[in-house]
Image (cartoon, rainbow, N blue to C red):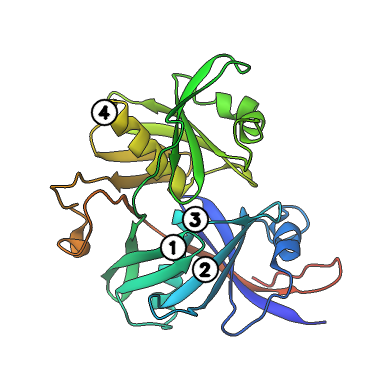
Amino acid sequence: MKTIPFTKMHGCGNDYIYVNTMLHDVPNPSEAAVRWSDRHKGVGADGLVLIGGSPVPEADFSMRIFNADGSEAMMCGNASRCIAKYLYDRQLTNKKVIRLLTKSGVKTLWLHVENETVESVTVDMLCPAFEDDNLFIPSLDPHLGTFVSMGNPHYVIFTDDVDQVERIGQELERHPAFPQRCNIEFARVESNGDIRTRVWERGSGITLACGTGACATAVAAAITGRSDRQSFIDMDGGKLFIEWPSTDKQPSCGGCMGKTTPNHVYMTGTANFVFDGCIEMEGTKENTNQ
């Protein structure tokens, strides 16, 4: 039976199974994502990420991401940082600026390298988009949130009780107000200015972190006057630094200074290897050789 080599990685605890499809084909990634993501019968992850070459000259590599329920996502900020580390640390590229093709456009990744190892990555998440900025959902305890698209939809609710996300995240994800379903963030601005955020990801449920969710939360905090345009987003799995420079300013993200676009959102955080293994493509028996 055919086996596929994979690498498990995480960004702030947001863990995915990564397969290099430039070497190994995954014929049915949606089905594979469901089976392999199972935390009892599979590898265990928030989903499956396919790393590929780029079919267009505007990008160096490509990514496809499938949630644990098999649905295909548009983009994942944490996964994009992991891809940057994978490509550089595994010597598939020597570039410290990588252009990554996603289903929500080409993202530029700046690799911050120390001793030939990627320590952190800054991702240009492009401009946020707004529709129904303040959406009131009267059927759910009344909640007034802010809708922000970071290439995928997010609904950010500021509240003292961020743990509500465990109770009503799934209901909000599938609320009729969101015909394509939605990622849900519950957030609270702390006394030190950090923003404590918990997330329910569309197609995956509660996750330890969400890169696009962190960006959406930072943007929502800024436009509602709760924060300035720089903030640390404190999620269950760790912190991400988010900058949303205004049109007359540049972000301060280290090596990307002077090469960025004002009004884009920039996310900086770490990426980590967990383990390598092989998994069977067919049948019900998964084999993970760590």
**SS class, disc 2:** strand
Marks 1/2 in contact by CB < 8 Å: the verdict is no
Q: Residue at x 41, y 62 (%)?
A: 81
Of labels 3 and 4, earlier in sequence is 3
Residues at badges 3 and 2 in contact (C-beta under 8 Å)?
Answer: yes
What distance separates the C-alpha of mark 3 from that of mark 1?
Answer: 12 Å
Circle 2 or circle 4, nearest the eye:
2
Residue 174 relative to residue 51: left or right: right
Mark sitting earlier along the chain (3/1): 3
Q: Secondary structure at mark 4?
A: loop
Q: Identify residue type, mark 1.
A: Gly
* Secondary structure type for disc 1: strand
Give whichever of discs 1 and 2 has the lower sequence position.
2
Q: Are marks 3 and 4 in contact (CB under 8 Å)?
A: no
Mark earlier in primary sequence (3, 2): 2
The reply to whether discs 2 and 4 touch (Cβ–Cβ < 8 Å) is no
Could you tell me residue 151's position as x and y percent? 46, 51
Proximity of marks 3 and 1: CB atoms separated by less than 8 Å: no
Q: Which residue is mark 2?
A: 63
Circle 3 sits on which residue?
76
